[in-house]
Image (cartoon, rainbow, N blue to C red):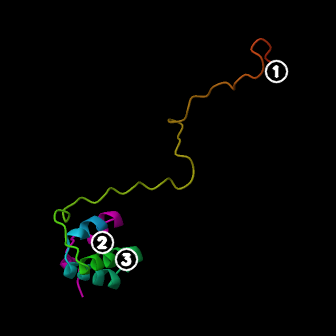
Amino acid sequence: MSTHDELPLADYDHLPLSALQHRIRSLGAEQLGQLLEYERSHADRLPVVEVLTARLRQLESGATPSPGEPGAEPLPERPSPPRGGSPVTPQTAAEPSPPPRHGHPDHPGQTE
């Protein structure tokens, strides 16, 4: 069984799925098998297992590793939305304004 330090992708545990999909394209079948074994014995995340298995099948069907991706930067994580409540503070709130007037401009209490 592989340990974290022996994995072909040093930052494997911290890669978002989208970055992992691109990074594994440079790996061979043996390296993918190593990642798959590690994943199944640790986090066993179904989406990650599916991505690794699909790429392994591609290689077994004749695909070849593509160079240039192992050092690619992972995609930035999206910030989490606020957990309830308004992000507006007194400093960022709009200035108060009088309510709109209704009716005809010459006769404020009547409508046309």
Residue neighbourhood size for the residue with mark 2, other residues' Cα within 10 Å, grouped as few (<14), some (14–19), many (≥20): few
Q: Residues within 10 Å of mark 1 (few under 14, many from 20)?
A: few
**Residue 64 percent coordinates (x, y):** 19, 73
Disc 2 on helix, strand or loop? helix
**Residue drawn at (40%, 55%), measured in percent from left and top?**
78
- The answer to whether residue 46 is left or right of residue 55 is right
Which residue in the rendered view is the most extreme toward the left? 67
Q: Quadrant of residue 93?
A: top right
Of labels 2 and 3, the one closer to you: 3
Mark 1–mark 2 distance (CA, rounded to whole Å): 66 Å
To which residue does mark 3 refer? 50
What kind of element bears circle 1? Answer: loop
**Nearer the viewer's eye, disc 1 or disc 2?**
1
Magenta-drawn segment: 1-19
Residue 75, image x, y percentages: 31, 57
Camera-near label (1 vs 3) is 3
Residue 34's quadrant in the figure? bottom left
Residue 15 x/y as whole percent: 30, 66
Which amino acid is tagged 1?
A: Thr
What residue is rendered at 50% in x and 35% in y?
Answer: 91
Against 6, is 16 above or below?
above
